[in-house]
Amino acid sequence: MGKKKNKRGNNRDERASFIVDMFREFPDNKFSLKHLAAASGGADRDGRTMTFAIIRQLIEDGFVEEVARSKYRLSRSAMPRYEGVVASLTPGALYVQVDALESDVYVARRNGGGALDGDRVALVVARRSRDGELEGTIVEVLERSTKPYVGVAEVTANAIFVTPDSRRLGTDIYLSRRRYPEVEDGDKVVVRVTEWPEGERLPYGELVERLGKAGDNDTEMHAILAEFDLPYHFEEEVERAAERIDGRISEQDIAQRRDMRHRTTFTIDPADAKDFDDALSLHKLADGLWEVGVHIADVTHYVTPGSVVDNEALERATSVYLVDRTVPMLPERLCNDLCSLRPNEDKLCFSAIFTLNDNSEIVDEWFGRTVIHSDRRFAYEEAQAVIEQGDGDYKDEILTLNRLAQQLRAMRFKQGAIAFARDEVRFKLDEQGRPIGVYTKVQKEANQLIEEFMLLANRRVAEFCAHRIANGRKVPRPMVFRVHDEPTEEKLTRFKEFALRFGHYFKASKGRAVAKEMNKLLTTIAGKAESNAITTLAVRSMAKAVYTTDNIGHYGLAFPYYTHFTSPIRRYPDMLVHRLLASYLAGEKRGDKAQLETLCVHSTEREILASEAERASIKYKMAEFMKDHIGEEFTGTVSGMTDWGLYVELDETHVEGMAFLRDIDADDYYRFDEARYEVVGRSSGVRLTLGTPVRVRVKSVDMRRRTLDFQLLL
């Protein structure tokens, strides 16, 4: 305020201007009359009288408000007022997403007005902080979020206090003991916040559901689903509607379809799969030509738009895969019975049938509804044994399909697809769902065989549906695409700098050259110590795939057109694509682009939630598995880093935990250098970055937070 000293004096206009500037510069401060008078030119009798008159006028103008006896603050009505949604919480702050502003608004907890994650709020934006961040104050909670919170109940004589599993809320939730007498101490419960009365220390909530005792496997898995607002059972109305579906295949059904029951057909799935929604058929045509059928369960034959089952599938949008269970999008009557392509049964399908030459080039293609009869169900391991040994059931068909698939794969990578290969953690569970071992899922040729023909069907269906031909021109049609954007130059620059630290020079900066260079790098690092670290950051540098009606192609797969057609049992977008394909084959101009885009956004959001729930279940099982290993030492590699610690992935089990910087070495101070993406010891000069081999001791396990704490040993 030193620069404003020249404005001070007994001139009323100068004094008023200075006072207005003070309120604007410090909108949260409460100023006394004496302070304002002294700061603006003097606190003698005349100065105080003049200042009081100025303040009275500013109050009348609505610029200033009296907040306590002779204490004044900039009026909230004088600040820009906006509406927004609380987008994230930290223990000390909230961030509000405001559509009318270019960035989120930071709100200190003390100015949060009792707002919580997802609440719609009114706020005033007071200023920018030193780093340019918008800062504001929430003045009203307009609409409480219905977001559920999962936590453990502590029951007293008169109250229930729920401590949420998530740290983000930052407070317990109060429930009435009289209203919920059935809740017991130690129960895991789902609650919603209903209000946060002014002056109360805790928000008030209502009980949504008792899940069971904390620590029980079913309880904890249901808690994860509830945390992400995902269902874990079907309402009776939905189950009854599914049971009423007529599963008989009539002669009329068969007459309206292409009969493929005479073709050799089989499924290849995981050994523990219960639903089989895709099958392959193979038939030798003339010399050098093959008919390959990709047959997908015809879910939309049984599930009609707007029906009870369809509405439920739309709401769920996807099946959810936790460590020990699948939460299906469709009731069991459909996914495990009517639409499961079980062997030795006639089944209704939607098929993509290709004529390929010996080089896996498409000579002809056909799309439409079929009836099939699967001859054999293979587990991936069984099909892989046929490929490796060259002998077994349907060996000629499997070996031929594998040869064609490997050619399709080679062509895909030649065209610029990116060959990411990362280990996937899986758990061996006992009968109670407790983890007794950890292993990694290995992708072999049998997996690739299925993958390549599913990719082929998806991309060709997408291209067929994308346009119709009118007067020799391509006319766009509404379509649900699965798209993947190019990586940003900013992310690529960071990735290049990181790879260079390991001595790998990444030259490309945009276009298809990035994919070519990425494959070259991934091949070079295969089997090396830094492989997992570089691959992890490479994946993070890529954009996320989404559903949309605006096609930009799929960068990672190097396809100009791509969709999801092959899994309608577990993904609602695939059902949409089946309906669009059926209408376009019939010559109809079906498809409301705006409505489809809304469904695409919803499906993407639900897919993200399902992925987060899956990761949460993996973290829980990791914590549960390591509970019996506290105090033991393991080797691992640095897999991530933050301002406060390092993530370390154990070599043998791929279990990941956090090693806090404050715990590394009592005789040194470690800090995170974000620009170089490394942690450095100030005294020792020790440098740790992604991929650095380390030794750790298991320090503690927090089952509620699903976290592991490691002690880094140097």
Image (cartoon, grey):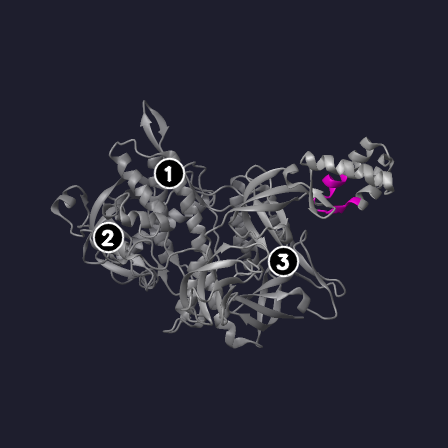
Rendered image: mark on residue 596: 1
Q: Is residue 672 magenta?
A: no
Mark closer to the observer (1, 2): 2
Compared across the picture, whether 241 is left or right of 403 comes to left
Q: Which residue appears at 57% of the width and 62% of the height? A: 529
Q: Which residue appears at 79% of the width and 36% of the height? A: 18
Residue 430, position as x, y percentages in the image: 38, 74
Contact between marks 1 and 3 (CB within 8 A): the answer is no
Rendered image: mark on residue 112: none
Residue 8, position as x, y percentages in the image: 85, 37
Q: Which quadrant: the N terminus?
A: top right
Compared across the picture, whether 324 is left or right of 95 comes to left
Compared across the picture, whether 591 is left or right of 59 comes to left
Decide which of tag 1 and tag 2 comes sooner along the chain.
2
Q: Which residue is mark 2?
A: 241
Residue furthest top as drawn? 471
Q: Which residue appears at 68% of the width and 66% of the height? A: 662
Q: Which residues are magenta?
A: 21-33
